[in-house]
């Protein structure tokens, strides 16, 4: 069965568990003040658009875009099921989000991710997708635990 990318259904209990696993995975990677993942409530705010990737009705990936300022959004909550990493799911989802943003007139996508080894595959994905290092944006401040990247669409 092909992968299905669609806007998140917050009534789906599988989504809640998948997002909690994301937060649990991130917890040991940095001190609390250096972790910027959105929780379930924050992902439901009107200025956030969350997508899921499903394979045979099982969620295998998530990613969100959150408004920062006019025509500038932030990539958030990017996660692939650990058992499915390396299959191209994240790249397909990232491409989907970038196209959605472009279709809506967004001109720039920025993101914050960890600077630790745990996040090396994510940083490599973003760099291959055309993101480049940038200064902290929005409410972020310099933090040795964070890497900031941005891409014009």
Image: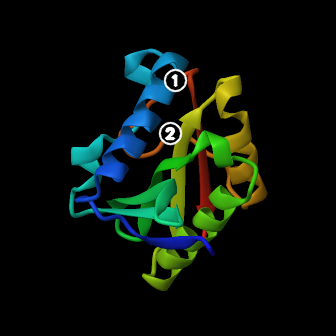
Q: Return the x and y of residue 146 as percentages of the image width and height.
A: 56, 29
- Reading the chain from its start, which is encountered first: label 2 or label 1? 2
The residue lying at 63 percent from left, 70 percent from top is 95
Q: Which mark is residue 143?
A: 1
| Neighbourhood count class around disc 2 (C-alpha, 10 Å): few under 14, some 14–19, many 20 upward | some
Q: Nearer the viewer, residue 47 or 54?
A: 54
Give the colouring mode of the picture: rainbow
- What residue sits 38% from the left and 18% below the top? 32
Q: Element at badge 2?
A: loop
Write down the quadrant of residue 145 in the picture.
top right
- Residue 36 visible in the picture: no
x and y percentages locating residue 98 in the rendered image: 56, 70
Q: Residue at x 69, y 46 (%)?
A: 85
Is residue 27 visible in the rendered image? The answer is: yes
Task: Say few, some or many: other residues with alpha carbon within 10 Å of mark 1 (under 14 / 14 to 19 / 20 or more).
Answer: few
Q: Residue at x 64, y 28 (%)?
A: 115
Query: Do the residues under discs 2 and 1 have CB atoms within 8 angstroms?
Result: yes
Up the image or down, 120 lies above or below 15; here it is above
- The C terminus lies in which quarter of the figure? bottom right
Toward the viewer: 77 or 72? 77
Secondary structure beneath dot 1 equals: loop
Left or right of residue 4: residue 32: left
Image quarter hosting the N terminus:
bottom right
Image coordinates of residue 72 in percent, x first then y, are 43, 64
Q: Can you tell which quarter of the image residue 55 is in? A: bottom right
* Image location of residue 91, percent across then percent down: 68, 61
Residue 136, numbered label: 2
Vertical order, 32 against 120 (above or below): above
Above or below, 131 against 134 in this view is: below
Query: Disc count in the image?
Result: 2
């Amino acid at each position: 069965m092909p992968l299905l990318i669609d806007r998140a259904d917050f009534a789906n209990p599988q989504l809640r568990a998948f997002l909690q696993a994301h937060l649990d995975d991130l917890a040991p990677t940095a001190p609390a003040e250096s972790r910027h993942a959105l929780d379930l409530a924050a992902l439901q705010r009107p200025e956030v658009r969350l997508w899921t990737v499903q394979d045979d009705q099982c969620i295998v990936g998530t990613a969100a875009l959150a408004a920062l300022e006019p025509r500038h959004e932030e990539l958030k909550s990017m996660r692939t099921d650990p058992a499915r990493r390396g299959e191209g799911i994240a790249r397909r989802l990232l491409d989907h989000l970038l196209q959605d943003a472009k279709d809506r007139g967004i001109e720039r996508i920025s993101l914050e991710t960890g600077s630790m080894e745990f996040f090396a595959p994510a940083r490599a994905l973003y760099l291959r997708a055309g993101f480049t290092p940038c200064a902290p944006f929005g409410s972020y401040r310099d933090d040795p635990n964070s890497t900031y990247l941005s891409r014009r669409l």
